[in-house]
Image: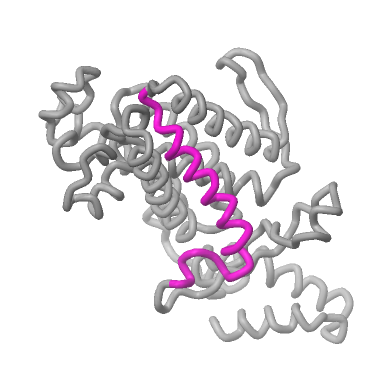
Amino acid sequence: MLDDRPYMRPEEPQFRAPSMQKPWSGWAILLTINIVVFLLQLLIDPNSLSARMDLFAKSIVGQWLALDSGQISWLLPMQLFTYQFLHGSVMHLLMNGLGLFFIGRALESAIGRREIIGLYLVSGIIGALFQLGFAALFPNQFAGPMVGASAGVFGFMGVLARLFPHREVYLLLFFVVPLRMKLHWIFWGSLAIAVVSISIAIRTATGDQVAHAAHLGGLLYGAFYVAILVRNGGLMRFLLGMPRIRFVSDDPAKGSGVTRRRNWRKPKVVDAAEVAEGDFMSREVDPILDKISKQGIHSLSERERKILDKARSKM
């Protein structure tokens, strides 16, 4: 584990660039899969990109891989996953790809690669179930084939906004006007848009070919992830052998009343088994070693001693 420290690393010839030696980020893996699948759609199944529903219905994607909320079949367990990596047009892929890139990059530093992949998949499944539920109640408005990564992207947004509600970001309103906004306003705005769009579809008995129910499901699951799973060590810890993720807050809320009522925002993650070992050392161990050199080992708190014991066990 200490091989990446400058004073422990042996002198060896480097045959690859440092960037090539690092594992891929979770968001990069997801984005790459979406792009590769879209290219395969172009080459093998171009009818799946047609705006004509009769051509789409005859395509491989339309028959086997898209999630059709109007015609549930025995393929549903597979389609809950496959639909998340398919898209209907270049613009559809571009919008979701931008979300994976910008939101995924910001979020992965907080929850880690393993968690972000699991979050994407489960958000997509929850979003699909929301769409299926609304389609069962209002088939004219919500039934039909569904593809796209947007439920997973909305899950990312839900987690990022609830973890860091006071973080400010810049948006391009109508792709032209720059707008500075806090993440919690983006969360509530996205939630309001989804709810209003669903209400309008129900009242007018018409749909707009946008899976608003799936967006709502992904967003709400993101909020659930922060409210419940953060305090229990993350999502993937429920799989056998997966370690807990420890969340350490570094983004104190400016509205302390919310924090007093429910301590459910603990933004930053440290997971020695998931996050790169070098990151664990630089984030947790190095500051403790500096403190020892300046103040002595007697100055360490109980938490800092436990971190050193954890690092020693991995050497």
Residue 136, given in percent of the width and then of the height, sits at 33, 41
Q: At 44% across and 44% down in the image, what residue appears?
A: 152
- Can you say whether 196 is above or below 111 in the image? above
Q: Kindly give the residue lying farthest to the top in the view shown.
A: 176
- Can you say whether 68 is above or below 268 in the image? above
| Left or right, 21 with reference to 271 | left
- Can you say whether 297 is above or below 12 in the image? below
Q: At 22% across and 45% down in the image, what residue appears?
A: 72
- Can you say whether 9 is above or below 19 in the image? below
| Left or right, 6 with reference to 136 | right
Q: At 23% across and 50% down in the image, what residue appears?
A: 76
Residue 259, given in percent of the width and then of the height, sits at 80, 57
Residue 97, given in percent of the width and then of the height, sits at 42, 33
Give the extent of the magenta segment: 209-238
Q: Residue 212 magenta-drawn?
A: yes
| Left or right, 98 with reference to 177 | left
The C terminus sits in image quarter: bottom right
Q: At 54% across and 37% down in the image, what residue appears?
A: 102
Nearest the viewer among 211 and 268 is 211
